[in-house]
């Protein structure tokens, strides 16, 4: 299975949230570099704050696929 990535951001209360597109679907990327570029584009202030000691507020997560996921996906 191909490796996929998603982006997340942390709100002011310390809770992490997935990023969704304008269509309401989870943003998923096939390449980590693309995910990081989208992260910087969607959350430029949070992304830049990390460079100046503002703490980590954004991240790229590798999506681990599980063969035992239910319901079974069509192949």
Image (tube, grey):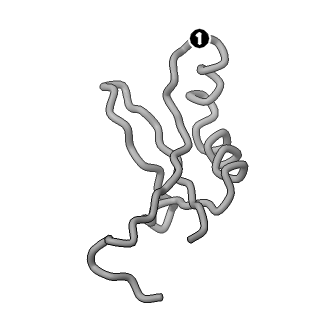
Residue lying farthest to the top in this orientation:
53
Name which residue lies at 46% across and 58% down. 64
Name which residue lies at 65% across and 25% down. 48
| Label 1 residue SS | loop
Name which residue lies at 63% across and 34% down. 44
Q: For this rendering, which residue is in front, 5 or 52?
A: 5
In the visual, does 32 lie left or right of 28? right
Rendered location of residue 4, percent (x, y): 57, 60
In the visual, does 46 lie left or right of 25? right
Quadrant (top left/top right/bottom left/bottom right) for the N terminus: bottom right
Looking at the picture, does residue 36 appear above or below residue 14? below
Looking at the picture, does residue 11 appear above or below residue 19? above
Rendered location of residue 28, percent (x, y): 55, 61
- Quadrant in which residue 73 is drawn: bottom left
**Disc 1: CA contacts within 10 A as few (<14), some (14-19) or many (>=20):** few
- Quadrant in which residue 30 is drawn: bottom right
Rendered location of residue 51, percent (x, y): 66, 18
Residue lying farthest to the left in this orientation:
70
Name which residue lies at 72% across and 48% down. 33
Rendered location of residue 46, percent (x, y): 56, 28
Looking at the picture, does residue 69 appear above or below residue 41? below
- Quadrant in which residue 11 is drawn: top left
Q: For this rendering, which residue is in front, 50 or 73?
A: 73
Residue lying farthest to the bottom in this orientation:
74
Residue holding disc 1 = 53
């Amino acid at each position: 299975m191909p490796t996929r990535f998603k982006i997340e951001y942390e709100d002011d209360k310390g809770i992490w949230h997935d990023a969704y597109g304008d269509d309401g679907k989870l943003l998923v990327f096939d390449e980590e570099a693309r995910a990081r570029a989208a992260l910087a584009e969607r959350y430029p202030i949070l992304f830049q704050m990390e460079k100046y000691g503002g703490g980590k507020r954004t991240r790229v997560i590798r999506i681990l696929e599980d063969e035992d996921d239910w319901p079974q996906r069509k192949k």
